[in-house]
Amino acid sequence: MNWDDPTDATADEGPAGSAAERLVGSVADGEDQAVEAALRPKDLGEFIGQEKVREQLDLVLRAARARGATADHVLLSGAPGLGKTTLSMIIAAEMGAPIRITSGPAIQHAGDLAAILSSLQEGEVLFLDEIHRMSRPAEEMLYMAMEDFRVDVIVGKGPGATAIPLELPPFTLVGATTRAGLLPPPLRDRFGFTAHMEFYEPAELERVIHRSANLLDVEIDTVGAAEIAGRSRGTPRIANRLLRRVRDYAQVKADGVITREIAEAALKVYEVDARGLDRLDRGVLTALLKLFGGGPVGLSTLAVAVGEERETVEEVAEPFLVREGLLARTPRGRVATPAAWTHLGLTPPRPATAGNGQQDLFGA
């Protein structure tokens, strides 16, 4: 079970609140944070999935321990809920070092960063979530801190300002980002190890669900776990959230044991279908197919048809629909794919033809 703390993840899933209210949203709410703290793996051996990242990170940490040195700075990128915060805590545990957690949006001035860096202990791990959202002055200060373990603190203003060099103890920075492309090259190049977190395969999510069920003292069979895994969008955080909701249903409506039938019935109540689409996702597809014949249609028009804000459709619903191959973004607008028609059980309209049986270039 591997997830991230949502230090500031709402910006990556659309307007505030719109993602957090979704059962299949990858932003964690207060309940998620409390449960995740209890379910997180403590070392790389317990961490499920991300085999390449685990193998590479294990080599980095073992080599650092053998040298008796702090580990290289680590950059973790990937969608929310895949395990970036969990890995940062594992790095600290494997190195036997304390960890300090903060976020890019919380560091608005260079002085904020200087205060954090100057209070670090030797070997401490500093986890900086959403590092791409850090202010530019703080980012420039971080360059020197990562490379030379020192910062220049500016005292005073104007012509009388003085730069006082401040030596820092060796530390390991673990940066996490959902948008690696927004990181400037000078910052990205200062990380000794960079890893991209991939979405999970259903079989990996089944293992996550079984482990979580054991820790939560929930009885679940193999096909029940597979049913939940198939609707979890490749994200452990969502898998664990769905598991808890299915557990509630099983305790109230059944004997507490999660089977395929119980999982299907529970997730039908919560409006999560077999591919992991929820009400918003299906609303977007339904409007696109029934009102606009599958498109192309402009984003603003589609948002009005769904009754949602443009940003909600674009940043909350569309990424998963595109990844699932149900919707395509084109220069002319949004277009539904054949898979979307099949998923909703609808028949695509036949193209208009001219009198000679050939397709009319001006047909709808």
Image: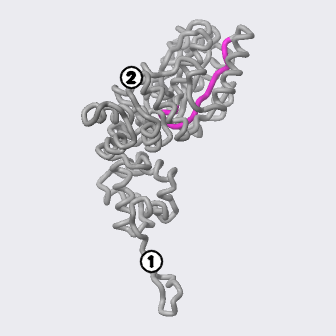
Question: How many marks can you see?
Answer: 2
Q: Amino acid at mark 2?
A: Asp
Which region of the structure is painted magenta?
70-82
The C terminus lies in quadrant: bottom left
Query: Compared to 71, does 52 lie above or below?
Result: below
Query: Compared to 319, does 200 lie above or below?
Result: above
Residue 324: x and y in percent read 50, 52
Is 355 situated left or right of 76 in this image?
left
Q: Magenta residues: mostly which secondary structure?
A: loop
Mark 2 vs 1: CB contact within 8 A:
no
Query: What residue is pinned by disc 2?
Result: 217
Query: What residue is pinned by disc 1?
Result: 350
| C-alpha separation, residue under disc 2 versus residue under disc 1 | 53 Å
| SS at mark 2 in the image | loop
Between 131 and 84, the one nearer to me in the picture: 84
From the viewer's perspective, is the residue at label 2 or at label 1 nearer? 2
